[in-house]
Image (spheres, rainbow, N blue to C red):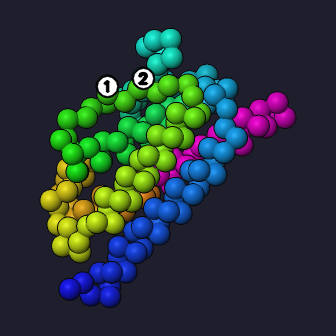
Amino acid sequence: MPTPIENNLMKCLIEQFKISNQLLTYHLNTLTIEECLWQPSKKGIYLKRIGADKWKGTFPESEDYKVGPPNIAWLTWHIDFWWSMVINHSFEEGTLGMDDIVWQPSIEKITNQFETLAQKWLKLISGLSTDDLNSSKYSKWPITDCPFSGVVAWLNLELMKNAAEIGYIRFLYCTRDMR
C-alpha cells in the first residue's frame, strides 16, 4: 500500500502537469498561424516546408545561443514531438521517430493534438502504481536510467518551458513594431 509521501508524489506530478498545461492552453488562446510562422530573428530554429500544408522540424547542431531563437511553429512541433515520443516509447510500440511528426498550419489541429495528448497522458500516468513511478520500466525515452517519476517530472518541466517560450515570443510579436 502506498505511503502518504508516495501518494503525494503522484498528486504533485499531476498538479505540476495541470499547471504547465494550463499555461500552454493560455498561450495558445487567440494564437494565429501568422504568429506561429513569424521569425523573431533572421537566424533561428524554424520548420522546413515539405508539402503544401506540411512542415517538418529539425534540431540545431548545437544549443549555442548563436543558433538563434525558435519560432512558435517550431515550438509547437517540438511539443508534439517529445510528448508523442514519450507516450509512444513508454506505453506503446516505441517505433515513433522524428520524421513521423509533421506540423500542419492549423491552430485547430495544433490545439486538438495537444488536448488529445494531455488527456492520454493524464490517463496513462494516473493509472500508474507507486512501484511503476519508482521503476525504470517505462523510462525508455528521453531518459532511460531513472525512475519513471523522473520522466514525468521532465515532461512537466519541458511543457512549462515550451509554454513560457511561446508566451515570450507572442509578447515579441505583438510589440515588434514598437521599436
147 or 17, which lies in front? 17
| Callout 2: SS | strand
Q: Which residue is mark 2?
A: 56
Q: Is residue 171 left or right of residue 46?
A: right
Residue, disc 1: 99
Q: Outermost residue toward the right?
A: 178
Q: Which residues are magenta?
A: 159-179
Q: Report the quarter where the C terminus lies.
A: top right
Q: Please provide percent x and percent y for residue 126.
A: 33, 66
Vertical comparison of 118 with 110: above or below: below
Residue displayed at 51% across by 17% down: 53
Location of residue 79 with respect to 38 vertically, above or below: below
Q: Look at the image and tell me whether residue 70 can be seen.
A: no
Earlier in the chain: of badge 1 and badge 2, it is 2
Kind of residue at disc 1: Asp
- On the rendered structure, is 38 left or right of 79? right
Magenta span includes 166 = yes
Q: CA distance from mark 1 to mark 2?
A: 7 Å
| Residue 114 vertical placement versus 58 (above, below) | below
